[in-house]
Image: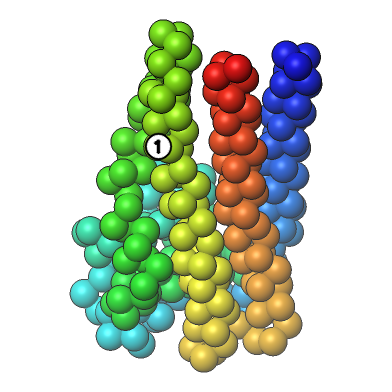
C-alpha cells in the first residue's frame, strides 16, 4: 500500500510538472512569435491602452510602466493599468494584445463583472491558504493530528477555488481585448487572428495552473488518507 501511494504521488508530481512546462513553452512560443510582428499602425501598448480606456469612459485610470517580465496587470485598488517595459513601449501585436487584455480587466471592474467581484471577495482567504495551508498539513502529520491535516487541505481548496474563478475572468478579458482591438481599429483581421492566438496561449497558463493545483491537492489527500490508515 505504501509503495502504491509513493508511486501515485510521484506520478502526480511528474504530471503536474509536465503540464506546467508545456503551458510555459506554449505561451513563450506564441509570445516570441508575435513580439516580432509589428502592428501596421505602429501603436505602442501605452497608446492602445490609453485609446481603449478613454473610449470606455475610463479617463481617470492611469497607465504606468512596471518592472519585470509578464508583470502586466490591472490594479483595481489604485485604478492603474501597469504594463511591463516591452508592452508599454512595444509596438508588436503581442504588446497591444496584452495592453488590451489588461484594459479588459479595467472595464470588468467598471461594469461590476461578477467573477472579478467573487475573486476579490475570497482573495484574503487565499492569502491565508497560501501562507499556512501546507504548514497546517505538515504540523497535522507530524503530530498525528489528522483533523488538523484535513483542515490544511481545506485551506488549499480556497486556492483551487480562486483559480477556478480566475478562468472566466481571464477568458472574458481576452475576449474583450480582441473585440476592443477590432472596434477601436487598432488591428486588421489578419493581425486580430495573431492576437487571438497569443491571448489563448496566455489563458492556457491559467488552465494549467488550475490542473496543477488540483493534482497537488489530490496528492495531499492521498498522503493524509494514508496517514489516517
- Which residue is pictured at 51% across the width and 56% down the height? 164
Residue 199 image position (x, y, % from top left): 62, 66
- On the rendered structure, is 54 left or right of 139? left
Colouring convention used in this rendered image of the protein: rainbow
Q: In which quarter of the image is residue 18?
A: top right
Judge by depth and name the residue closer to the eye, 42 or 137: 137
Residue 74 image position (x, y, % from top left): 36, 61
Judge by depth and name the residue closer to the eye, 7 or 82: 7
User: Visible in this render: residue 197?
Assistant: yes
- Which residue is pictured at 71% across the width and 72% down the height? 194
- Which residue is pictured at 52% across the width and 91% down the height? 183
Q: Secondary structure beneath disc 1?
A: helix
- Which residue is pictured at 65% across the width and 86% down the height? 188
Residue 151 image position (x, y, % from top left): 39, 31
User: Visible in this render: residue 31?
Assistant: no
Q: Which quarter shows the C terminus?
A: top right
Residue 214 image position (x, y, % from top left): 60, 43
**Residue identified by numbered label 1:** 155
In this rendering, is residue 23 above or below 102? above
In this rendering, is residue 5 above or below 100? above
Q: Which quarter shows the N terminus?
A: top right
Judge by depth and name the residue closer to the eye, 91 or 97: 97
Question: Tag 1: Cα neighbours inside 10 Å, few (<14), some, or many (≥20)?
Answer: many
Amino acid at each position: 500500500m505504501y509503495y502504491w501511494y509513493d508511486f501515485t504521488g510521484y506520478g502526480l508530481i511528474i504530471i503536474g510538472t509536465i503540464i506546467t512546462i508545456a503551458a510555459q513553452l506554449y505561451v513563450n512560443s506564441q509570445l516570441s512569435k508575435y513580439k516580432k510582428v509589428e502592428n501596421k499602425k505602429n501603436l505602442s501598448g501605452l497608446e492602445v491602452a490609453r485609446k481603449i480606456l478613454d473610449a470606455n469612459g475610463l479617463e481617470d485610470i492611469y497607465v504606468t510602466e512596471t518592472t519585470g517580465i509578464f508583470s502586466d496587470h490591472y490594479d483595481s485598488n489604485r485604478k492603474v493599468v501597469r504594463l511591463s517595459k516591452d508592452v508599454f513601449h512595444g509596438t508588436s501585436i503581442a504588446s497591444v494584445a496584452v495592453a488590451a487584455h489588461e484594459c479588459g480587466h479595467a472595464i470588468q471592474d467598471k461594469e461590476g463583472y461578477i467573477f472579478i467581484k467573487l475573486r476579490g471577495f475570497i482573495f484574503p482567504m487565499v492569502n491565508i491558504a497560501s501562507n499556512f495551508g501546507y504548514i497546517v498539513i505538515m504540523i497535522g502529520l507530524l503530530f498525528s493530528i489528522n483533523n488538523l491535516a484535513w483542515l490544511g487541505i481545506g485551506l488549499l481548496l480556497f486556492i483551487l477555488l480562486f483559480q477556478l474563478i480566475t478562468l472566466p475572468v481571464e477568458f472574458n478579458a481576452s475576449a474583450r481585448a480582441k473585440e476592443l482591438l477590432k472596434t477601436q481599429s487598432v488591428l486588421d483581421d489578419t493581425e486580430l487572428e495573431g492576437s487571438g492566438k497569443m491571448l489563448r496561449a496566455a489563458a492556457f497558463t491559467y488552465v494549467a495552473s488550475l490542473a496543477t493545483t488540483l493534482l497537488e491537492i489530490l496528492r495531499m489527500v492521498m498522503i493524509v488518507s494514508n496517514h489516517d490508515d
